[in-house]
Amino acid sequence: MEARAILKDVPTSPRKMRLVADMIRGQKVSKALALLKFQPRASSPVLHKVLLSAVANWQQLNEGSKLEDADLIVKTVFIDGGRMLKRLRPAPQGRAHRIRKRSNHITIVVDDASVSVNEAVIES
């Protein structure tokens, strides 16, 4: 059974967050956590916490299963654009430049790999 974790209004641009999210998509959870822990980008600690939250949500949904026995994978990762704060920055000769401070929404879905394979076999 899949579990998800959602974090909204993260003050990082979606483009920068997607660079890190693309690395963990489809990976095993243990490998994804290791990648995020040692990744030098500023958005990796945020994704690390959201992934841990998704794993905790999976544990709560599957109380009889052990985390060590389950082969959890990062099924999907969505990075959607959030609200944009619009500011004005002074420019030469009395002009103004618009500054857009972007934010994003993160959705991570984790699932047991053996369940995903069984569902794919049944569908085909």
Image (cartoon, grey):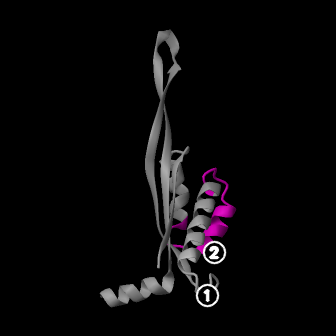
What numbered label is drawn on residue 9? none
Name the element at disc 2: helix
Residue for point 43% across, 47% down: 81
Q: Identify the residue at image location x=54%, y=64%.
A: 23
Residue stretch rendered in magenta on the structure: 24-44
Residue 30 got which mark? 2
**Is there any visible trace of residue 96 in the rendered image?**
yes
Which sits earlier in the primary sequence, circle 1 or circle 2?
2
- Find disc 1 in the rendering and name its residue: 69
Residue 41 lies within the magenta run: yes
Q: Is 63 placed above or below 89 here?
A: below
User: For the view shown, which residue lies furthest in the right direction?
Assistant: 38
Q: Type of residue at label 2?
A: Ser
Residue located 51% across and 17% down the image? 91
Residue projecting furthest to the top:
93
Residues packed near mark 2 inside 10 Å, few (<14), some (14 to 19) or many (20 plus) = few
Residue 68 in the image: state x and y as whole percent: 64, 84
Between disc 1 and disc 2, the foreground one is 1
Amino acid carrying label 1: it is Asp
Where residue 70 sits in the image (x, y, percent)?
58, 84
Binning the other alpha carbons within 10 Å of mark 1 as few (below 14), some (14 to 19) or many (20 upward) gives few
Marks 1 and 2: CB-CB under 8 Å? no
Quadrant, the C terminus:
bottom left
On whether residue 31 falls in the magenta region, the answer is yes
